[in-house]
């Protein structure tokens, strides 16, 4: 029997309950009208599953809960997958940029923790990264910092995709990384 694609089968509800939602910022905005000012709220939310998927969204409304709901819905729709090494850190260092916001993301050894400030910390906690060092350069605007961070995260490649692009085996790519670490340790 063919199913209607709009019908929900219950999996979406369970998937939504497992998501980590982080409120990054709320901004009160005012619109000047004839009778005075009309206030609204803008919310910025980061959502992730803690296993390598993360997204961000912004929403505006007259009430705070409605703005947060809109931002959360947008974050769920814009989730991207980021390859993680051993499920705890990034595969390699990366730089990202959006407008005046620039970020540097660095893979870190086990036990380092999340060394990142503000909006980037929320991204890494929702992503499920345990060890990373991140630095924000330029603006401290949370919107631009998050977009710069996502610019860097979407360009991170795992060993499989690098090996496929180069026509090599995954062992060649990973083996090279481990031999470089051993050479540095001997120095």
Image (cartoon, grey):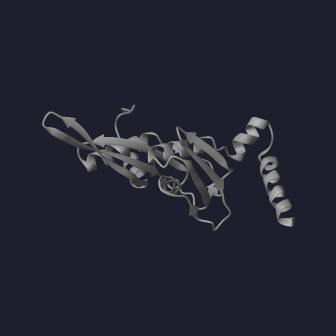
Quick one: 87 or 96, which is closer to the camera?
A: 96
147 vs 125, nearest the viewer: 147
Q: Nearer the viewer, residue 106 or 87?
A: 106
> Can residue 9 be seen?
no
Left or right: 123 in relation to 95: left
Q: Which one is nearer the viewer's eye here, 56 or 142?
A: 142
Q: Position of residue 116 (x, y in %)?
A: 55, 58
Name the quarter where the N terminus is drawn.
top left
Image spot of residue 142 (x, y percent):
45, 48
| Residue 109 pos. (x, y %) | 68, 63
Residue located 81% across and 40% down the image: 168
- Indicate the position of residue 186 as horizontal and vertical percent values: 87, 66
- Side (left or right) of 108 relative to 182: left
- Res 157 → quadrant: top right
Task: Give the mark count.
Answer: 0
Q: Is residue 43 visible?
A: yes
Residue displayed at 43% across by 55% down: 18
Tell me which residue sits at (80%, 59%) in the image.
Answer: 181
Q: Is residue 52 left or right of residue 142?
A: right
**Image quadrant containing the C terminus:** bottom right
Whether residue 156 is situated above or below residue 127 in the rendered picture: above
In terms of image quadrants, where is residue 89? bottom right
State the residue lying farthest toward the bottom.
111
């Amino acid at each position: 029997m063919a199913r209607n694609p709009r019908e929900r089968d219950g999996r979406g509800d369970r998937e939504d309950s497992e998501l980590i939602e982080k409120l990054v910022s709320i901004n009160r905005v005012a619109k000047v009208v004839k009778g005075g000012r009309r206030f609204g709220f803008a919310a910025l939310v980061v959502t992730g599953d803690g296993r390598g998927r993360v997204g961000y969204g912004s929403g505006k409304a007259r009430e705070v809960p409605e703005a947060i709901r809109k931002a959360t819905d947008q974050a769920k729709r814009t989730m991207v997958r980021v390859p993680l090494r051993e499920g705890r850190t990034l595969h390699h260092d990366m730089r990202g940029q959006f407008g005046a916001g620039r970020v540097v993301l660095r893979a870190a050894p086990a036990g380092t923790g999340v060394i990142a400030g503000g909006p980037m910390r929320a991204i890494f906690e929702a992503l499920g990264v345990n060890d990373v060092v991140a630095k924000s350069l330029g603006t401290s605007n949370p919107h631009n910092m998050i977009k710069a961070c996502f610019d860097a995260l979407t360009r991170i490649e795992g060993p499989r995709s690098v090996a496929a692009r180069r026509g090599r085996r995954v062992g060649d790519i990973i083996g090279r990384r481990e031999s470089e670490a051993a050479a540095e340790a001997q120095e």
